[in-house]
Amino acid sequence: MPTATSQPLVFWKDLSPSPVPLEPATPFSPRVLIVGGGVIGLVTAWTLLDKGYHVIIVAKEWASFGKKQRLTSQIAGALWEYPPAVCGQHTDAISLRHSRTWCMVSYHIWDAIAAKPDLAREAGVSVKPSDFFFPFHIEEDPTQLAKMDEIAASGVRGFRHSADIVQERNVNPEYGAVDAYELLAPVIDTDRAMTWLMSLVQRKGARLVTRTIHGDLLDHEQALRAEYAADVLVNATGIASTELAGDPSCYPIRGGLLRVINDGSDFPVIDTALSISAEVANEIVFLVPRNDKILLIGGITEPHEGELDYTLDTPIIKRMRSRCEAFLPLLKKARLDPDYPIAQGLRPFRKQNVRVERESRPVAGESIVKYSRIIHSYGHGGAGWSLAFGCAADVLAMVEEALLDRVPTPMATETVLARRRHDAESRISARL
């Protein structure tokens, strides 16, 4: 049986971009059914495959291209951020504490992918300067100062704090930005990355099934496990977890981005991500350069709005473009991407933010105590690309717990994490 720990995943050691799993599955290896084909589901599948599990992924739809509405994972700005993210509403203390760990696991893996030029091109991953601007000196705001200090000590590369960044990036002095800090952050071309991830997990042995599942997974757990010969289920369905996890606290935060040509023909190429909070609640300046000569212009966060009906003439979209042009005047010359001018999607949030834990409700129809083997990983909001690998590491540990039919625990406290580390170390010692 594969052995998991709650230790961070390390690229090349725990994960490989090779089409062959690091630990090939045997006919007797456990089987995991993952529901959800976005970045969380695919990264979780990659992690399990390289640890020797058989994996099946069921999803109602997959990454698509052209003019059709794309997956939420493709719509994302996909700029790595240290939580709480600029475009997020991260308020739960337990989730935030975990997210700070999850994001650093992901940071180092994306950074390692970007360090290999051929792999970086194939996966659509690059590392670029990312600048955060403020209309006040950071030392004057205890919350922002604490976050900046955490980032500086986190292990990110290229950190610097300087008001000179405002002038260096040609920010309009009349916009009000007076301070800034910078770090090197992974930026993911989501269309390319999703294509790469889907191909990678299939080459490693995952089976992809197109199917829509309705109802609470707990009610269908035994039937699904029997149908797919699965030992464990992983729910990575994002906003659909309202239904599939029986979680009414899930809600969408609608967002939109404009895509403009960033090839140097209309304005000097912007190769740095730039962001600053706006005066209007839930409206910010969010500029992210992609690998495909596209600059994303955003952003918007509209909680509890579920209709994808933005157009270029929608007032909030027009305001978004106007404030970005006011912040960086050279954008007044920007041309929209004629093939794909506007991207819009629904970020999957929940009241207590990210949930990575085992199902704790009793198994339906069981007369004796029996623990569910469902593991949930959803509610990532706008930070799925930033948290995916860290969350996958925790799911890996929970898969092993579920296979042992241990009592499910709530979102892991330090005590639970310490127990998992101790158990893992004990198993390793027993094998030596």
Image (cartoon, rainbow, N blue to C red):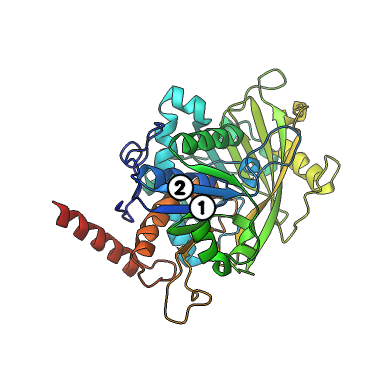
* Residue located 80% across and 46% down the image: 310
Q: Where is residue 266 in the image (x, y as percent from the top left)?
A: 72, 20
- Return the residue at label 1: 34
* Residue located 41% across and 32% down the image: 19
Task: Examine the image and state in which quarter residue 400 appears.
Answer: bottom left
Q: Is residue 128 left or right of residue 425?
A: right
Front position in the image: 56 or 120: 56
Which mark is drawn over residue 120? none
Q: What element carries label 2?
A: strand
- Return the residue at label 2: 55
Query: Within 10 Å of the Cα at label 1, are there few (<14), some (14-19), or many (20+) other Cα atoms?
Result: many
* Residue located 39% across and 64% down the image: 402
* Residue located 54% across and 54% down the image: 236
Contact (Cβ within 8 Å) of mark 2 with mark 1: yes
Q: Can residue 141 be seen in this view?
A: no
- The amino acid at mark 1 is Ile
